[in-house]
Image (cartoon, rainbow, N blue to C red):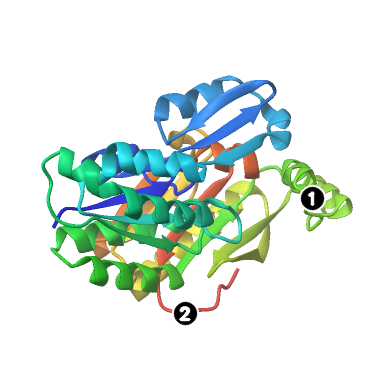
Amino acid sequence: MRIGVAIDAACDVPQDFLERNGIAVMPITVKVDGQKFKDDRDPVEIQRFRNQKLGSKSHSGETEPSSVEDVQNLFLDRLVKDYDCVICLTIMATRSPIHDNVIKASFAILKNYRPIREAAGITGPFLMRVVDTRNIFAGSAPVVAEAVRMIQAGKSPAEVRERVAHIADCSYGYMLPRDLNYLRSRARSKGDRSVSFMSSMLGTALDIKPILRAHRGETGPVGKVRGFDHGAQLLFDYAAKRVQAGLLVPSLSLSYGGDLDEMRALTGYHALTRVCGDAGVEILESPMSITGMVNVGEGAMTLGFASEDHVADF
């Protein structure tokens, strides 16, 4: 059986990983300052967004995930012919309507695929399995990596779905924002008052950065640090300890809202890569999606892995 993977564009995984594994991307349309960007993880489009230097204007940007019709078209035009089953992975349903859109689209896809496959000379049924990664940005990557690993191991659709659903429950995504004022402005533009004016001003004045965690569909702060570089070092050191303790998926993901060489120059990065190399853990590095940069600001970093339950200590 030919099993494929389709992801939400806000799942931060490298472009070469997508291409090597034939992963389809359900795009997000981003509108900022009168300009439109197609967020489908294309590095050229991500660079075009960064070259615009929209800066503070991005906090009022609009993001539109693939609609029900968009998802239907992607599948009926292409995927029902390329595969016999597609595992669809989306960012947490509590943060985006894309999961619900894919579920709704699946009814029409499963109703209408037969004549399309027959016309292409393909026999047999077509299956869809939709999984909420319960995470966001780099935190969704462990689920994507595990889906690919299970498919390459020849597992059945039921086995793949069961395993990735388990990994979704065990995935941890961490984010270190660079600009608290941007984060506050973006939150307010979406009606979220969780980042107050005083806390953002105080944090900016003292260079205090929160460490935010996404896990099982919820997001919130788990620590705070003084200075972005120091915060990155703490996150890298923390991730190295989790790698040494043992991960459930042999990969660790990093995404950065800027030039990846800037992230690689941060203290603790090379020590983390050595620990991952010794443990046989693949590092998946990618530019943050356009959607991610609009929501949390350029220069932010996210990190993701899957492990047994533990208490974050920052």
How much space separates mark 2 and mark 1, taking CA atoms?
32 Å
Image mark for residue 11:
none
Q: Give the residue drawn at x 25%, y 62%.
A: 278
Q: Estimate the x, y position of residue 59 in percent, counting from the top left.
A: 71, 37
Side of 36 where 70 appears, left or right: left
Quarter holding residue 285: top left
Side of 188 where 21 appears, left or right: left
Q: Secondary structure at mark 1?
A: loop
Q: Estimate the x, y position of residue 19 in percent, counting from the top left.
A: 26, 38
Q: Quadrant of the C terminus?
A: bottom right
Side of 93 where 240 appears, left or right: left
Q: Residues within 10 Å of mark 2 (few under 14, many from 20)?
A: few
Instruction: Check contact, mark 2 vs mark 1: CB within 8 A.
Output: no
Q: Residues within 10 Å of mark 1 (few under 14, many from 20)?
A: few
Which tag is nearer the camera, tag 2 or tag 1?
Answer: 1
Q: Give 225 or 9, whichever is nearer the viewer.
A: 9
Vertical relation: 289 (above or below) 276: above
Q: Quadrant of the N terminus?
A: bottom left
Q: Which residue is mark 1?
A: 191
Vertical relation: 33 (above or below) 303: above
| Residue 81 visible from this viewpoint | no
Query: Could you tell me the amino acid type at mark 2?
Result: Asp
Q: Estimate the x, y position of residue 105 in percent, counting from the top left.
A: 44, 51
Q: Secondary structure at mark 2?
A: loop
Query: Could you tell me the amino acid type at mark 1?
Result: Gly
Q: Which residue is mark 2?
A: 309
Q: Give the residue drawn at x 52%, y 42%.
A: 67
Q: Estimate the x, y position of residue 246 in percent, counting from the top left.
A: 33, 73
